[in-house]
Image: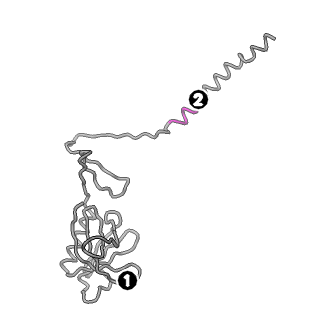
Amino acid sequence: MALLKSSWLWRQTSVLKRWKLNWCDLWIDGSLCFYKSDNRRELEHRVSLKLACIDVQSGQECGGVTPPESNPRENLVVVHLMDGSTLNLCANSEDESIAWKLTLLQTRRNPVFTYDPYDDSYQAVPLNSRHTVYITPGAGPGTHQVIVQRDPFDGVVEHLALGMLAGMAAGAAMRSFLWMPLFFC
C-alpha cells in the first residue's frame, strides 16, 4: 500500500477528551492510523475512511471543539464518522490542517486499484466486503463477462415433488402384483 500523508497530529481521546500527540499515517486504501511514535510500532487507533467517514471540516468550521493549548482554532480538523462520533485532530499550522482536510476528502472519495500479478487483474478496494470489483487489463470496451452463480438448492422442491409423484404411480401400478401370491394359495 502507498502512503499518502503522514505527520505529527494532536488527537483528542474519546473518553477523557484529552489531547495526545500521535504520528498519523493516511494510506491509499483509506486507513487513517495513529501511532505513539514515528517508527510505527505501536498502533493506537485506526479508522477506515472509505467505510466510516461522512464529512471533514477544518478551521472555523469546527464549532464546539476546543483546540489544545498554544494552538489556534484554525489548526483544527474534525472528521465526522458514520456512528455519530467525531475524530478531532489538530495540526501544527493552518496550511497543514487544510492539506489534511483536502487529502482526507480525496481519499474518502476516490477508488483504489491494486494489481495482483498472479491473477493478472486489478482489484478495486471495495467500499465494503460485498462489492469487490475485478478489472482485467486488455478487456476493452464492448467486452462483457457475465458470471451467473446458481444456488445449489435451486429446484430441489420440484425434484422432490416429481419423485413423490413417480413413487405414488409406481406404488399404484405394483399394488396389484402384491396380491398375486395370494391367488395361488
Quarter the N terminus occupies: bottom left
Q: Is residue 159 magenta?
A: yes
What mark, if any, has residue 17 been given in the picture? 1
**Residue neighbourhood size for the residue with mark 1, other residues' Cα within 10 Å, grouped as few (<14), some (14–19), many (≥20):** few
Q: Secondary structure at mark 2?
A: helix
Horizontal arrangement in the rendering, residue 123 relative to residue 129 (left or right)? left
Question: Which quarter of the rendering shows the C terminus?
Answer: top right
> Where residue 33 sits: x, y (%)?
30, 69
Measure the alpha-carbon separation of dots 2 and 1.
68 Å
Q: Is 22 in front, or is 102?
A: 22
Relative to the observer, which residue lies in front, 88 or 37? 37
Amino acid type of disc 1?
Lys
Compared with 174, 133 (above or below) is below
Kindly indicate the quadrant of the structure image that contains residue 60. Answer: bottom left
Q: Residue at x 27, y 51 (%)?
A: 123
Image position, residue 76 (x, y; %): 27, 80
Q: Which residue is mark 2?
A: 163
Q: Quadrant of residue 40?
A: bottom left
Is 15 situated above or below 138?
Answer: below
User: Callout 2, which amino acid?
Assistant: Gly
Q: Residue at x 39, y 78 (%)?
A: 14
